[in-house]
Every structure is written in structure tokens, then in C-alpha cells.
Image (cartoon, grey):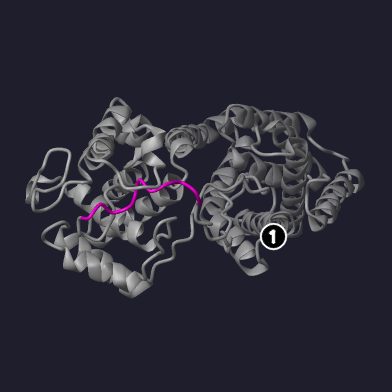
Amino acid sequence: MRELPPAARVYLPVVVLSSCGALVTAPYDGVPWVTAALLASLYLAGELAGAPLPPVLFAAAMLLPPGAAALVAVPGALGAPVRGEPRGVRRVWHAAQLSLAAYAAARARGLLDGGPPDRLPGLLLPAAGAALVFWLVSAALTGGVLIAAEGVPAVPAWRDALLGSLAPHLTYALVGLLAAVLWQGPFGSLAAVLALLPTHIARWVAGQAQRERATHQATVRALVQAVEIKDRYTRGHSERVGRASALIAREIGLPAERVEALRLAGILHDIGKIGVPTRVLRKDGPLTPEERRIIELHPGYGHDIVRGIEFLDDARSAILHHHERMDGSGYPHGLAGDAIPSSARVVAVADAFDAMTSARTYQPAREVGEALGELRRCSGRHFDPEMVEALVRIVDRDGWNPALTTDEPEPFAAPGPVGVTRVAGRVVAPRRHARGHGGADRETGRRGGKGRRA
């Protein structure tokens, strides 16, 4: 707890104590403990399998008294895997949040009681009330912890907590209502479990996809960090080139999968510098012809490095050809015009733009308008005119913010059972320009709006 902000050290104990108070003071007379134990086991099993079953908590709110409904959430929340530190505090917070939401939902259902939970449509009003209360309580607690522990402004914190969980919340509430009705029906708990099975499978598939995306991101981070060890400038530059490449791709109407491929290509376009001697990358003086030949090998090195990484297949051609020029004077293959892959033409413009607008040890950053003017001057000879004009439209319409958008620490508010918590309003500090990384990026006498590498 000591590493948490002071506001969080107050907020979290208040929520936990409130949850404990609800559990201690709730009446437990007439609780169907077998049903409560089965529901708690189902929720725990889903959490341990990495595919939580949020409808179980709604079913508990419909089938059980408030105290028992709150207890159903506790074992699963405490046993759920968490990311980030402090893990114990996060688990306790998650359990308190869910138990309070389940308790409040069950209370709302009791106040709007429509009769036995296997009777429709009389059950619809209490079910709607329970779902509404669960959503509001869970989102309010999530927004509160983002404000206290993460420093997110109040309006975006609660707005995103509410809006981000609304759609999944409604879906899970309907499935939970179906499970509750079946549970009390003639087919019993087995039918309810079968009704929950599709939700479990869908959550498991979504979890697998999320883990795959996380693996991809970790791979990209590792590659960028590897080249950053040799060239401290590369990380900030690569991230901005990836961002600009994605913006250009979206502007010219490419589909979402191509936009993502170009974002990755922009981030990794200089990965081949791993194979370039550090003395060349960091050299302060002009490059000799031999050193220039060495550094011009980096696109081929990069192409070879990502070969065999399946999710980077679409980025390989851009990595290999991003230094080609429309007039055929580029490298490594001297391609010209439409023979240059369109992805490489996108990255070339993004790369040149960031190289010109970034401060380096040997030259100050150019103004954005000046950089765009230089791109236009070289349009048709060095750069694809379509890509240049797309970037100009983007900057004229939206401006250009060179601040980095790096991976951030895991938000304290773990994703809840009814939707993904999104942190809005986060302000990322602008990058501080790396110093002392040498002159391997400086121009070598060629005009063209950028240095001889980027």
C-alpha cells in the first residue's frame, strides 16, 4: 500500500471495509447454500481458466439474498490472475468491488421483486433494476479507483467506466437472467450451466486473442528495445513513424488490417540497425563512403530479422524498401515508381517527416510547415505524391503532436467482469530528445528532405 498515492490509501480501505460490512451485516436466514456454493464454484472456475463468467454474478443476484450474492463473487475475485503490483491489494480490491456490486444488485432485485425467479415476464423489472444497479455501482467504484490510484481526471474516468461497460453489461445481464430462470425451472442447475457454456467459450476465445495480441506487442517491444541499445534515438523515432504511417494508411482508405501492418512496419523500419556497427550509428562526423555502404545494409538486415515472424509478414516489404525513391536513386534495390511497394512508400514519407521535425545533436528540428514543404518539393522524385498529400491533409486537419505514445503501466483498476476498463484523459509527457547519439542520421549532401538514414 505504501507505493500507492495517498488518495488511494484512503479510498481502497473504505471500499474494502464497506464490502466487509455488507457481508457481515447481511441476514443469511434461508439462504440456499448449495446454490450459492455451486455459483461461487462456477465463477471461480471461470476465473482460474482465464475466461470469467460475469453472468454467474447476475444469476446470483437473482437467485440469492444480498449477502449470499456478494459472497459468490469473493472466491473467484481473490483467485483471479492479476497483472501489476501490488497483486494482493489488487485482488482484494477486485473482490470488494464485485461483492459490493452483487450485493447492491440483489438488494435492488428484492425491492422490485416480481415473484419466483422462474416466472416471466414479471421477473423482467427486477432483473432490469438489478442489472442497472450492478452496472452503476461497479462503474462508480472503477472510476473512483482510477481517480485515486491513477490520477485520471474525474469526468473521463467515470465516463469511460460507465460507457465502456454498458454494452457487455447488458449482454451478461440477459444471459444471467436466462441462467437464473433455468436454474429454478424443471431442468435445474444443469440446464443453467449449459446456458452459460457459450458465454464461457466466447470469453475464452476472446482471452486467447487478447493474449496473442499481448504476445505480438511484447515481440515488437523486444525488437525495438534491442535496436535502442545501439541507437538511443530509434525508439522515439520509430514510434512516431509507426503512428504517422498508420495515419497515412487510414487517410488513403486502406483496410484496418493494412493500417495495423503499416503501423508495425513504421515502428520496426529501422530494426536492421541491430546489424550495423555501433561506431557507425553514433559517429559524430560525416560518414565515409564505406560507412555509408554499411549503413545502407540495414533494410536487408531488418527484412531478415522479421522473416518467419508470421504476424509481421505484411510489414516485411516496407522494412526492406522504405529507402527506395520514386526516381530509382534509393536503396537497397534501386526500385522506381510503382515498383516500390505501396507500404514502403507510406513509411518513407512518415520516416522523412519525423526525421525533419525531430531535434538531433547536429541539427534543430524543422517547423512542421517547413518539413511538409520539403516533402512536397521532393514529391515525385523521392516520395510518392499521393502519400505526401495524404500526410499534408492529416496535419492541416488534425495537427501533429510529436509526443510519444508508449506502453503504460497496467491501470490499477483491473478489467471487471462486465467490460474492459479504459483509461481516458491520460496525459503522456512529451519525449525528451536523446542526446549524444552521434551523427549517423545527418545528411550527406543529397537533397531530399531527410538524412541519409531514418
Q: Quadrant of residue 391?
A: bottom left
Residue shown at the point (33%, 52%) measured from the top left: 442
Amino acid at dot 1: Gly
Q: How many marks?
A: 1
102 or 288, nearer to the observer? 288
Residue 79 in the magenta stretch? The answer is: no
Farthest residue, direction right = 25
Residue 282 relative to residue 158: left or right? left
Residue 344 relative to residue 423: left or right? left
| 215 is higher (above) or lower (below) than 160 | above
Q: Quadrant of residue 47?
A: top right
Q: Secondary structure at mark 1?
A: loop
For the record, the magenta segment spans 435-445
Q: Quadrant of residue 143?
A: bottom right
Residue of label 1 = 151
448 or 292, nearer to the observer? 292
Residue 325 relative to residue 30: left or right? left
Q: Residues within 10 Å of mark 1 (few under 14, many from 20)?
A: some
Farthest residue, direction top = 308
Horizontal and vertical percent position of residue 225? 47, 37
164 or 269, nearer to the observer? 269
Residue 442 in the magenta stretch? The answer is: yes
